[in-house]
Image: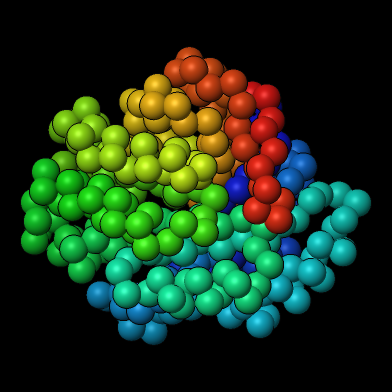
Amino acid sequence: MIRSDFHLHTCFSGDSKSSVESMIESAIKKGLKTICFTDHQDFDYCPEDDNTISFDLDVQRYFPTMAQYKEKYQDKIEILTGVEFGMKEGIENSVWQMVKQYPFDFIIASSHEAGGYDPYYPRYYDTFGEEQGIRIYFESIVKNIALFDGFQSYGHLDYAVRYLPSKNYFYHPKNYFDILDVAMKKIIEMGKGIECNTSGLKYGLGQPHPRLEVLKRYRELGGEILTIGSDAHKPEHIAYDFHLVPDMLKSIGFKYYTIFREQKPEFIKL
Protein backbone atom coordinates (compact mmCIF):
# COMPACT_ATOMS: atom_id res chain seq x y z
CA MET A 1 0.00 0.00 0.00
CA ILE A 2 1.23 3.47 -0.87
CA ARG A 3 1.37 5.57 2.29
CA SER A 4 2.84 8.78 0.84
CA ASP A 5 1.19 11.48 -1.28
CA PHE A 6 3.70 13.82 -2.91
CA HIS A 7 1.46 16.21 -4.83
CA LEU A 8 -0.96 18.21 -2.69
CA HIS A 9 -2.38 21.74 -2.83
CA THR A 10 -3.91 23.97 -0.20
CA CYS A 11 -5.28 27.50 0.03
CA PHE A 12 -1.70 28.64 -0.57
CA SER A 13 -2.45 27.74 -4.21
CA GLY A 14 -4.70 30.02 -6.23
CA ASP A 15 -6.90 27.14 -7.35
CA SER A 16 -7.60 25.63 -3.91
CA LYS A 17 -9.66 26.81 -0.94
CA SER A 18 -8.70 23.93 1.34
CA SER A 19 -7.03 24.68 4.64
CA VAL A 20 -3.72 23.02 5.45
CA GLU A 21 -5.22 21.40 8.53
CA SER A 22 -8.18 19.92 6.63
CA MET A 23 -5.78 18.29 4.20
CA ILE A 24 -3.64 16.90 7.02
CA GLU A 25 -6.64 15.50 8.88
CA SER A 26 -7.88 13.79 5.72
CA ALA A 27 -4.45 12.27 5.07
CA ILE A 28 -4.35 10.87 8.61
CA LYS A 29 -7.83 9.37 8.25
CA LYS A 30 -6.74 7.69 5.03
CA GLY A 31 -3.77 6.06 6.72
CA LEU A 32 -0.98 8.04 5.10
CA LYS A 33 2.36 8.20 6.86
CA THR A 34 4.00 11.00 4.85
CA ILE A 35 2.61 13.90 2.85
CA CYS A 36 4.32 16.65 0.92
CA PHE A 37 2.53 19.89 0.14
CA THR A 38 3.47 21.18 -3.30
CA ASP A 39 1.61 24.45 -3.65
CA HIS A 40 1.72 26.31 -6.94
CA GLN A 41 4.25 28.91 -7.97
CA ASP A 42 3.58 30.00 -11.56
CA PHE A 43 5.47 33.19 -12.28
CA ASP A 44 3.84 35.55 -14.80
CA TYR A 45 0.73 33.41 -15.13
CA CYS A 46 -2.39 35.25 -16.27
CA PRO A 47 -5.67 33.27 -16.16
CA GLU A 48 -7.91 33.96 -19.12
CA ASP A 49 -11.17 34.06 -17.19
CA ASP A 50 -10.30 35.52 -13.78
CA ASN A 51 -7.48 37.99 -13.29
CA THR A 52 -8.03 37.90 -9.52
CA ILE A 53 -6.50 34.40 -9.30
CA SER A 54 -2.85 34.38 -8.34
CA PHE A 55 -0.43 31.49 -8.51
CA ASP A 56 2.24 33.34 -6.57
CA LEU A 57 3.19 31.37 -3.46
CA ASP A 58 3.40 33.44 -0.28
CA VAL A 59 6.58 31.73 0.92
CA GLN A 60 6.98 34.08 3.88
CA ARG A 61 3.76 32.64 5.34
CA TYR A 62 4.07 29.19 3.81
CA PHE A 63 7.12 27.95 5.70
CA PRO A 64 6.09 29.20 9.17
CA THR A 65 2.62 27.72 8.66
CA MET A 66 4.03 24.35 7.64
CA ALA A 67 6.44 24.39 10.57
CA GLN A 68 3.51 24.98 12.91
CA TYR A 69 1.61 21.97 11.58
CA LYS A 70 4.69 19.77 11.47
CA GLU A 71 5.07 20.32 15.20
CA LYS A 72 1.36 19.89 15.95
CA TYR A 73 1.07 16.60 14.05
CA GLN A 74 4.55 15.20 14.56
CA ASP A 75 3.24 12.12 16.37
CA LYS A 76 0.59 11.38 13.72
CA ILE A 77 2.04 12.07 10.28
CA GLU A 78 5.21 13.31 8.61
CA ILE A 79 4.64 16.63 6.84
CA LEU A 80 7.09 17.83 4.20
CA THR A 81 7.20 21.15 2.39
CA GLY A 82 7.46 21.32 -1.39
CA VAL A 83 6.48 23.42 -4.36
CA GLU A 84 5.20 22.95 -7.91
CA PHE A 85 6.73 25.34 -10.39
CA GLY A 86 4.82 26.01 -13.58
CA MET A 87 7.73 26.35 -15.98
CA LYS A 88 8.05 28.44 -19.12
CA GLU A 89 10.69 30.53 -20.84
CA GLY A 90 11.64 33.77 -19.12
CA ILE A 91 10.98 32.82 -15.49
CA GLU A 92 13.96 30.57 -14.79
CA ASN A 93 15.89 33.23 -12.84
CA SER A 94 12.91 33.81 -10.53
CA VAL A 95 12.56 30.05 -10.00
CA TRP A 96 16.24 29.63 -9.15
CA GLN A 97 16.14 32.56 -6.77
CA MET A 98 13.28 31.01 -4.81
CA VAL A 99 14.89 27.56 -4.76
CA LYS A 100 18.14 28.96 -3.39
CA GLN A 101 16.37 31.01 -0.74
CA TYR A 102 13.95 28.45 0.70
CA PRO A 103 14.53 24.86 1.95
CA PHE A 104 12.02 22.86 -0.07
CA ASP A 105 12.00 19.12 0.59
CA PHE A 106 10.67 18.37 -2.87
CA ILE A 107 10.29 20.30 -6.12
CA ILE A 108 7.94 19.45 -8.97
CA ALA A 109 8.46 21.12 -12.32
CA SER A 110 5.38 21.16 -14.55
CA SER A 111 4.18 22.56 -17.84
CA HIS A 112 0.95 24.47 -17.31
CA GLU A 113 1.36 26.70 -20.34
CA ALA A 114 2.53 25.96 -23.86
CA GLY A 115 2.49 28.10 -26.96
CA GLY A 116 1.35 31.03 -24.84
CA TYR A 117 -1.81 29.35 -23.53
CA ASP A 118 -2.91 26.99 -20.78
CA PRO A 119 -4.59 23.84 -22.19
CA TYR A 120 -7.11 24.19 -19.36
CA TYR A 121 -8.83 26.88 -21.43
CA PRO A 122 -10.67 26.06 -24.69
CA ARG A 123 -8.66 28.71 -26.52
CA TYR A 124 -5.64 26.39 -26.49
CA TYR A 125 -7.17 23.68 -28.66
CA ASP A 126 -9.23 26.22 -30.61
CA THR A 127 -5.91 27.76 -31.62
CA PHE A 128 -3.76 24.69 -32.23
CA GLY A 129 -6.11 21.77 -32.76
CA GLU A 130 -5.66 18.49 -30.93
CA GLU A 131 -2.70 16.85 -32.67
CA GLN A 132 -0.59 19.99 -32.88
CA GLY A 133 -1.69 21.10 -29.42
CA ILE A 134 -0.47 17.88 -27.82
CA ARG A 135 2.83 18.07 -29.68
CA ILE A 136 3.38 21.71 -28.69
CA TYR A 137 2.72 20.75 -25.09
CA PHE A 138 5.26 17.90 -25.11
CA GLU A 139 7.79 20.15 -26.83
CA SER A 140 7.36 22.63 -23.98
CA ILE A 141 8.61 19.98 -21.56
CA VAL A 142 11.84 19.57 -23.54
CA LYS A 143 12.34 23.34 -23.44
CA ASN A 144 11.52 23.61 -19.75
CA ILE A 145 13.95 20.95 -18.55
CA ALA A 146 16.69 22.86 -20.38
CA LEU A 147 15.75 25.97 -18.39
CA PHE A 148 15.71 24.49 -14.91
CA ASP A 149 17.30 21.35 -13.51
CA GLY A 150 16.58 21.98 -9.84
CA PHE A 151 13.48 19.79 -9.73
CA GLN A 152 13.20 16.21 -8.52
CA SER A 153 10.14 15.10 -10.50
CA TYR A 154 8.38 16.40 -13.62
CA GLY A 155 4.66 16.60 -12.94
CA HIS A 156 1.67 15.20 -14.88
CA LEU A 157 3.65 14.69 -18.06
CA ASP A 158 0.53 14.67 -20.26
CA TYR A 159 -1.51 17.33 -18.43
CA ALA A 160 -2.72 18.75 -21.75
CA VAL A 161 -4.52 15.49 -22.57
CA ARG A 162 -6.90 16.09 -19.66
CA TYR A 163 -8.60 18.88 -21.58
CA LEU A 164 -8.83 17.40 -25.07
CA PRO A 165 -12.10 18.36 -26.76
CA SER A 166 -12.44 14.74 -27.94
CA LYS A 167 -12.25 13.60 -24.31
CA ASN A 168 -9.12 11.50 -24.83
CA TYR A 169 -10.75 9.09 -27.30
CA PHE A 170 -8.27 9.63 -30.13
CA TYR A 171 -5.07 10.27 -28.19
CA HIS A 172 -2.40 7.61 -28.70
CA PRO A 173 0.87 8.24 -26.82
CA LYS A 174 2.92 6.19 -29.31
CA ASN A 175 2.25 8.91 -31.90
CA TYR A 176 4.31 11.28 -29.75
CA PHE A 177 7.10 9.00 -28.52
CA ASP A 178 9.54 10.81 -30.80
CA ILE A 179 9.30 13.94 -28.64
CA LEU A 180 8.41 12.18 -25.38
CA ASP A 181 11.52 10.03 -25.70
CA VAL A 182 13.65 13.16 -25.99
CA ALA A 183 12.08 14.59 -22.83
CA MET A 184 12.23 11.39 -20.80
CA LYS A 185 15.78 10.49 -21.84
CA LYS A 186 16.92 13.95 -20.77
CA ILE A 187 15.09 13.66 -17.44
CA ILE A 188 16.76 10.29 -16.81
CA GLU A 189 20.17 11.61 -17.88
CA MET A 190 19.75 14.48 -15.38
CA GLY A 191 19.07 12.03 -12.56
CA LYS A 192 15.51 13.30 -12.19
CA GLY A 193 12.15 11.55 -12.25
CA ILE A 194 8.55 11.84 -13.33
CA GLU A 195 5.37 11.30 -11.38
CA CYS A 196 2.41 8.98 -11.52
CA ASN A 197 -0.38 11.48 -10.93
CA THR A 198 -3.72 9.88 -10.10
CA SER A 199 -5.77 12.95 -10.94
CA GLY A 200 -6.22 11.41 -14.40
CA LEU A 201 -8.33 8.74 -12.70
CA LYS A 202 -10.24 11.39 -10.78
CA TYR A 203 -11.02 13.23 -14.03
CA GLY A 204 -12.45 10.06 -15.55
CA LEU A 205 -9.67 9.41 -18.06
CA GLY A 206 -9.30 5.83 -16.88
CA GLN A 207 -5.53 6.33 -16.58
CA PRO A 208 -3.15 8.30 -14.39
CA HIS A 209 -1.05 11.17 -15.74
CA PRO A 210 0.85 10.19 -17.76
CA ARG A 211 -0.88 7.16 -19.23
CA LEU A 212 0.53 3.72 -18.54
CA GLU A 213 2.01 3.48 -22.03
CA VAL A 214 4.16 6.52 -21.23
CA LEU A 215 5.12 5.25 -17.78
CA LYS A 216 6.09 1.91 -19.34
CA ARG A 217 8.18 3.67 -21.97
CA TYR A 218 9.90 5.68 -19.24
CA ARG A 219 10.80 2.44 -17.46
CA GLU A 220 12.04 0.87 -20.72
CA LEU A 221 14.31 3.87 -21.26
CA GLY A 222 15.86 3.28 -17.83
CA GLY A 223 13.73 5.57 -15.69
CA GLU A 224 13.74 4.59 -12.02
CA ILE A 225 12.66 7.69 -10.09
CA LEU A 226 8.87 7.73 -9.92
CA THR A 227 6.92 9.80 -7.41
CA ILE A 228 3.25 9.23 -6.59
CA GLY A 229 0.82 12.10 -6.15
CA SER A 230 -2.91 12.68 -6.19
CA ASP A 231 -2.68 16.36 -7.17
CA ALA A 232 -5.46 16.85 -4.61
CA HIS A 233 -6.88 20.34 -4.13
CA LYS A 234 -9.56 19.10 -1.72
CA PRO A 235 -9.32 16.80 1.33
CA GLU A 236 -11.55 14.13 -0.23
CA HIS A 237 -9.18 13.74 -3.19
CA ILE A 238 -6.03 12.95 -1.20
CA ALA A 239 -4.53 9.56 -2.17
CA TYR A 240 -7.18 9.25 -4.89
CA ASP A 241 -7.33 5.64 -6.14
CA PHE A 242 -3.91 4.90 -4.65
CA HIS A 243 -5.09 1.33 -4.03
CA LEU A 244 -4.99 0.77 -7.80
CA VAL A 245 -1.50 2.11 -8.34
CA PRO A 246 0.80 -0.71 -7.09
CA ASP A 247 -0.62 -3.34 -9.45
CA MET A 248 -0.64 -0.85 -12.34
CA LEU A 249 3.02 -0.01 -11.83
CA LYS A 250 4.15 -3.57 -11.20
CA SER A 251 2.48 -4.64 -14.45
CA ILE A 252 4.77 -2.32 -16.43
CA GLY A 253 8.00 -3.13 -14.65
CA PHE A 254 8.26 -0.88 -11.61
CA LYS A 255 9.28 -2.31 -8.26
CA TYR A 256 9.72 0.90 -6.29
CA TYR A 257 8.37 4.41 -5.97
CA THR A 258 10.28 7.41 -4.64
CA ILE A 259 9.82 9.98 -1.90
CA PHE A 260 12.09 12.93 -1.11
CA ARG A 261 13.27 14.63 2.07
CA GLU A 262 15.58 17.62 1.74
CA GLN A 263 15.56 16.81 -1.99
CA LYS A 264 17.20 13.43 -1.34
CA PRO A 265 15.49 10.28 -2.69
CA GLU A 266 14.30 7.25 -0.79
CA PHE A 267 13.07 4.24 -2.77
CA ILE A 268 10.12 2.36 -1.30
CA LYS A 269 8.99 -1.06 -2.46
CA LEU A 270 5.57 -1.18 -4.09
Q: Residue at x 85, y 58 (%)?
A: 73
Left or right: residue 41 compared with residue 255: left
Coordinates of residue 39 in the picture (x, y in percent): 55, 65
39, above or below 43, in the image: above
Q: Residue at x 75, y 76 (%)?
A: 64
Left or right: residue 259 compared with residue 46: right
Q: Can the viewer see residue 64 in this picture?
A: yes
- Where, by quadrant of the figure, is residue 242 drawn? top right
- Where, by quadrant of the figure, is residue 81 drawn? bottom right
Q: Nearest the camera: 253 or 222?
A: 222
Coordinates of residue 10 in the picture (x, y in percent): 59, 65
Coordinates of residue 34 in the picture (x, y in percent): 73, 46
Left or right: residue 77 compared with residue 112: right
Q: Can the viewer see residue 35 in this picture?
A: no
44, above or below 266, in the image: below
Q: Residue at x 55, y 44 (%)?
A: 229
In the picture, the quarter occupied by the C terminus is: top right
Q: Nearest the camera: 150 or 86?
A: 150
In the picture, the quarter occupied by the N terminus is: top right
| Colour pattern | rainbow
Left or right: residue 196 compared with residue 68: left
Coordinates of residue 76 in the picture (x, y in percent): 86, 49
196, above or below 130, in the image: above
Q: Residue at x 50, y 44 (%)?
A: 192
